[in-house]
Amino acid sequence: MKTILAAVFVMLALLGSAWAEPMLINGAEATFPYPVYSKWFDEYAKINPDLHFNYQSIGSGGGIRQASEQTVDFGATDGPMNDEQMAKAKVKLLHFPTVLGAVVPTYNLPEVQTELNFTPQVLAGIFLGTITKWNDPEIAKANPGAKLPDKLIIVVHRSDGSGTTYVWVDYLSKVGPEWKEKVGVGTSVNWPTGLGGKGNEGVAGLVKQTPYAIGYVELIYAEQNKMPSGAVRNSDGKFVKASIAAVTAAAAGASKAMPADFRVSITNAPGEKAYPIASFTWLLIPEKIADPKKGKAITGFLKWMLKEGQGLAPALLYAPLPKEIVAMEEKAIGQIKY
Amino acid sequence: MTRTLSLRRRLTNGFMLSLTGVCTALVLGILFFILGYIAYHGISALDWDFFTKLPKPVGEHGGGMANAIVGTVKLLALASLIGVPIGFFGGVYLSEYGRKNTFGFLIRYAADILNGIPSIVMGIFAYTIVVLPLGHFSTVAGGVALGIMMIPIAVRSTEEFLKLVPASIREAALALGLTEWKVVSFVVIPTALRGIITGIMLDLARVAGETAPLLFTAFSNRFWSRGWLEPTASLPVMIYTYAVAPYDDWHRQAWAAGMVLLMLVLGANLLSRMILHRQLRG
Amino acid sequence: MVLFRRPGVSPADRLFRATVFTMAVSVLVITGVIAYELVRNSRLPIEKFGWAFLWGTTWDPVAERFGALPFLYGTLVSSALALLIAVPVGLGVAIFLSELAPRWLSDPAAFMVELLAAIPSVIYGLIGIFVLVPWVRNVLEPALSGTLGFLPLFRGAPYGVGMLTAGLVLATMVVPFIVSVSREILMAVPHSQREAILSLGATRWEMVRVAVLPYARSGIMGSVFLALARALGETMAVTMVIGNRPEIRLSLFEPGYTMAAVIANEFTEATSDLYVQTLIEIGLVLFAVTILVNAVARLLIYSVFTKVEVRE
């Protein structure tokens, strides 16, 4: 008995001290930019072995909440915080755009090999539950020649609070009054129909596993899993597929008139080449950081992210920030006090 | 005296009895299917990296769950620190002082109720008493959740094994002039020790597989978790996040982790059965 | 029966008793504190929604209007479905193991059935996602809608994930509880009961039906309630296969949501205090329901064993 106890204590002491070297900065955050963030933190840990950024892919809802409650050192979100959330947060949180991404409709149609076109009305109809079959005339009109099956559409959405959802429903409510009235905009909403999957990963997983399903995910999740992503008709009436160029085009307007706090929506942006369901994604950093070491670590990372980090984004299909915005942010880092 | 049974009664008899056999075959079949399926997918998925490497960035091939394995060990160690003393002494109380009184009944009942509380509710509880005051997710919070979950089984199994110790042994020791606490500590408990340890081992195996109470207490961590106040990865949570994701390589690792977890749990069960078997034989 | 009733306990004895007693009391205290914390941390929704929370059907995080009925419904229906499958099967196994199987088979088989209960729930979820869901979607649901499609229970698109799949997974998970408790209770039925009816010329099945089962009825009910409590609180496996939609639908093919699953999915993501506390209140409801069911189960089981002790 005594030896067992002794062994337990020795083990506890060992485990407690063995990894007492690097400092861990915790973040709770969106799944939308998770692939690029996990790449960044991995690379950054290689350059700065004494610093670890623990980034857990949860939802933007979590990112905002945990950062406001200060259960984490930083948060991340794909939908900017609204004024009410800003007012309720225990600390003032600064928004730092990191990259741009696109949310794409992805689907699982065993019979259809070509890529489908979606009009805003079709997307809203499917997610409102008014368009229920794949061979609906509305879908067929946008896809002449495609052999659409006579099957029920299985809608997949997020079950957790999410910035990807925010971008998606922000777009749907801009293009159709019905969505705005019935559902509204938020990181989690009262879905009229569909299955819930946890995280971008969960939605992609469900769509991939379920024939005749449609869901929405960040572009990289569709690409990495070789799932088709549809082209969406933009405000100039052109069908555009999500790509780095199309997302950059969508940000063109915003980069000229970026508000000082970086809270801006670029869904349904004008421009012939603009992909309409695009968004910045933000890190939420508290204005005051109590621990100076952490403050230094976080600002150090932000500076790295704006320079070297941007170079890693395109490989993961995220669009790097426009130059004007990088310059603005480099100035904004000075607002962080520690 | 034989009475001829009507055909109908005989048929009913045969039919219903074979139906019970079919049920048994079905349930055992499901067990073997699950074990076989996990083994089939798990063995091919296990490699050295799984035990030694950290997870890779999303979507990249390879990497392992070394941090989650250590995380699970740390969580279990913490859980034992809470669950074992309370469970053990609680069990001693029930067996030595509370066999038939109202208070003993109350505690026994509370332990059974505690055992029935859904694991996710334990997670909420640990969140409110550890995560909220500390301000962040931590290994400690996960350990508290699992530790409380250990208590009821530890209490009841300790009690059962102590009860097996014959009253004559206690009387003999008392007659020799030993004081009460010495009788319990040096005569009764050592006699039942093997059983008690087995019970606690089974208890540990049970909480080792718990996922729900860890989701918002121990949370998860892509790196090593230092000390006790940082969030930590754990095998069950990794299985969950990897299983619902779309990446094939994550699915592979989920099977591997499932296999490791299952071996741990089944190993503990088989081992305890062997130990108890030997004890019963003498 | 207090085992030690000697006058003049030494101070060391008192210390020992105090330690042991404190630890035992802490079991009670912890159970109480859990209840207290749950209530304390769900003040906001309790004040805002009152009892209407229990029958509200809207789950709208944007407008912050929350009702728990879809989750209550999903929890109850998936558990009921699980029992509907698990009770007959589990009883069948218990009867086989206690009445028919020879000892050398009965003990190891019972041990193996109990192993099913030892498998972690996340592993059930893993098997559920990759094996059961495709099977339900491609085989079971088309078959059911083909034969029983006239019932509203078996209509709609074969999603694979949904209430039916959740029920099947839960059934597998609770079978061992029914088997192990029922088997012990059946074995505790006195032999005289069996011999009496057999000597009257009954078949073995008639013996089981007339003499054994009625005698063990309350204990078996206890095992069913125990399994129910287990099913109600099960989280991971259900979350992974039920489809996570807060809506009340009659068809078993449709996705649903349970109380435990919504907590698991949304807890870390909830954006406001009200939202988080609402989830805690759902935890409180779940806690209350399982305690009630467990309390009934334990009383029923205790009653059988005291009955047996008294008679034998």
Image: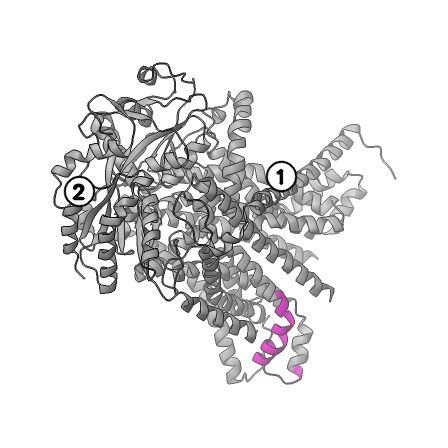
Callout 1: chain:
C
**Percent x, y for residue B175?**
66, 83
Q: Quadrant of residue C53?
A: top left
Secondary structure at numbered mark 1 = helix
| Frontmost residue, A173 versus B197 | A173
| Residue at 35% over, 50% down | A56
| Frontmost residue, B82 versus C174 | B82
| Residue C47 visible in rendering | no
Q: Which mark is residue A323?
A: 2
Residue hosting label 1: C89
Q: Which residues are magenta?
A: B175-195
Which is closer to the viewer, label 2 or label 1? 2
| Residue at 37% over, 14% down | A145
| Residue C274 visible in rendering | yes
- Position of the C terminus of chain C, as image quadrant, is bottom right
What amino acid is found at the position of numbered circle 1 in the picture?
A: Val
Q: Is residue B281 left or right of residue B113?
A: right
Which is the main secondary structure of the residues drawn in magenta? helix
Q: Give the answer, above or below, for where C135 lies relative to C177.
A: above
List the single residue furthest toward the right.
B1
**Percent x, y for residue A226?**
41, 32
| Residue at 27% over, 48% down | A309
